[in-house]
Image (spheres, grey):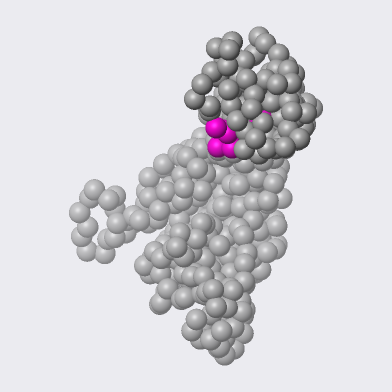
């Protein structure tokens, strides 16, 4: 259940909480809760030029207002002919003209004649077939009218090598569905039907904040007890990568471990962003202050997940009243308190925050893809929590399945375990070991670049 007040975050001896007020929620249940809130945050889209629409999700169907091709067109470089001339091969015809792509013939092909034609050119009046140039011979001498003569080495039939009107796209046909992510193919289709602007879903704005007295910026030297802040650059990069450069980022820097500083950063995020990602400050220490600050402004929906790594993941919502008299609904900011360990931070971002961002951006299916894979080596199980074990995948032609290779030591602070990882093994909460060659479920973290 959501924690209703600060007093429920009881502090034990020495300033540390001994018991968390949050039950460990299964990941599927937590994700369903997050997506239900994300759905409420989807806003009306905006119209953009087609040149700016790649990577966006379109809100409206795109309908062809005219057929493609709009005229019968040649599919070959060759000669436009009358099929009735070709009862046998070896026919010789007089060339009465030529038709190039982008031009319309000002003559008519009649039996006994033909016209030179290029791929994509309109079929001239009278012609009803095309024979490709490779199946012809140009005779050395012209006829008495000074026309070239062509010998045809094959027969043909009516309609051969001709694209009928509307054969690619019919008038009134739906070429792109609402809810489609626009990539090169979709952009090409939309351009083909003459649409130069489209309505796309708004993209989320995400604020990113690191917390901790131990953190320093990348450009600063480190001294005793300090480490460089890797989580913030990592999460910003993940947002840019998965958002295809379309999701906006607000870099809030580093907040020291004081309620005053964290409070100020949270307020800044509320004013600038749709989603806030924090890293660190969500565990059981006396300086883990994210949850108390979030409770001051909103509601925490869960504070722990039944997973390894990433148990302390916190999710909260903060509502900001609309301007008085506007009649608008309160504005909701979604907050993910990610764990401070870098692996835990990135894994929970991918499993929970990323589907949320995708849904806010209009994705019809925001979930990460799942496949089956075979274990190359035995893998130990955890009796306390399900584990999302980092792995690299390679394809096995022999077994007709992906082979999962563990990336080694799986400590939540060991970011090297993510470096070559394509996916996460979904290991059940259980005693014992999964044997080599066991088939397991795998969550893909992106394209399988390492399998090539």
Residue 293: x and y in percent read 52, 51
The foreground one among 17 and 371 is 371
Q: Is residue 17 left or right of residue 79?
A: left
Q: Is 408 rendered above or below residue 124? A: below
Q: Nearer the viewer, residue 393 or 426?
A: 393
Above/below status of 313 relative to 93: below
Question: Residue shown at 51%/21% (left/top)?
Answer: 141
User: Is residue 285 among what the camera can see?
Assistant: no
Residue at figure coordinates x 52%, y 74% from the top left = 396
Quarter of the figure with the N terminus? bottom right
Residue at the spot x=69%, y=26% of the render?
81
The boundaries of the magenta stretch are: 130-137
State the image coordinates of residue 393 (x, y, percent, origin top left).
49, 69
In this rendering, position of residue 392 left or right of residue 21: left
Q: Is residue 219 left or right of residue 171?
A: left
- Give the answer, above or below, for where 23 lies relative to 134: below
Q: What residue appears at the point 53 percent right and 86 percent down from the top-left corner?
A: 436
Is 415 a magenta residue?
Answer: no
For the residue pair 394 and 16, the one nearer the viewer reads as 394
Is 135 one of the magenta-colored residues?
yes
Residue 18 placed where, x, y %? 53, 74
Q: Is residue 440 at least partly visible in the picture? A: yes
Q: Nearer the viewer, residue 99 or 71?
A: 99
Q: Quadrant of the C terminus?
A: bottom left
Residue 71 lies in quadrant = top right
Q: Left or right? Give the position of 178 relative to 386.
A: right
């Amino acid at each position: 259940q959501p924690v209703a007040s600060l007093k429920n975050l009881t502090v034990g001896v020495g300033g540390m909480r001994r018991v968390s007020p949050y039950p460990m929620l299964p990941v599927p249940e937590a994700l369903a809760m997050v997506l239900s809130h994300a759905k409420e945050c989807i806003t009306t889209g905006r119209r953009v030029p087609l040149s700016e629409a790649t990577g966006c999700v379109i809100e409206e169907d795109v309908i062809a207002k005219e057929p493609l091709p709009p005229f019968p067109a040649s599919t070959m470089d060759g000669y436009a002919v009358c099929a009735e001339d070709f009862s046998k091969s070896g026919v010789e015809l007089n060339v009465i003209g030529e038709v190039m792509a982008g031009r319309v013939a000002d003559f008519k092909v009649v039996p006994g004649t033909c016209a030179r034609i290029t791929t994509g050119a309109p079929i001239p009046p009278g012609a009803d077939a095309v024979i490709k140039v490779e199946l012809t011979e140009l005779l050395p001498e012209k006829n008495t009218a000074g026309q070239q003569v062509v010998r045809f080495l094959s027969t043909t039939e009516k309609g051969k090598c001709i694209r009928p009107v509307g054969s690619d796209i019919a008038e009134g046909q739906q070429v792109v569905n609402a809810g489609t992510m626009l990539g090169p193919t979709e952009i090409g289709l939309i351009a083909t039907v003459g649409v130069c602007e489209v309505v796309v879903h708004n993209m989320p704005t995400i604020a990113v904040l690191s917390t901790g007295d131990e953190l320093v910026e990348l450009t600063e030297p480190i001294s005793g007890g300090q480490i460089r802040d890797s989580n913030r650059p990592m999460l910003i990069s993940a947002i840019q990568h998965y958002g295809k450069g379309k999701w906006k980022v607000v870099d809030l820097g580093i907040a020291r471990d004081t309620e005053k500083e964290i409070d100020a950063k949270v307020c800044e995020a509320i004013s600038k962003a749709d989603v806030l990602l924090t890293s660190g400050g969500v565990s059981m220490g006396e300086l883990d202050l994210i949850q108390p600050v979030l409770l001051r402004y909103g509601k925490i929906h869960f504070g722990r997940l039944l997973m390894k790594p990433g148990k302390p993941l916190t999710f909260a919502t903060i509502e900001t009243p609309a301007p008085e008299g506007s009649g608008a609904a309160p504005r909701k900011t979604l907050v993910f308190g990610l764990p401070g360990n870098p692996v835990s931070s990135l894994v929970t971002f991918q499993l929970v925050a990323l589907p949320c961002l995708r849904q806010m951006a209009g994705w019809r299916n925001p979930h990460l893809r799942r496949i089956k894979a075979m274990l190359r080596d035995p893998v130990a199980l955890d009796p306390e929590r399900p584990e999302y074990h980092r792995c690299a995948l390679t394809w096995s032609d022999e077994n007709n399945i992906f082979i999962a290779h563990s990336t080694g030591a799986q400590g939540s602070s060991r970011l090297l375990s993510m470096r070559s990882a394509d996916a996460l093994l979904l290991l059940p909460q259980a005693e014992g070991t999964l044997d080599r060659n066991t088939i397991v479920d795998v969550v893909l973290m992106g394209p399988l670049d390492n399998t090539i």
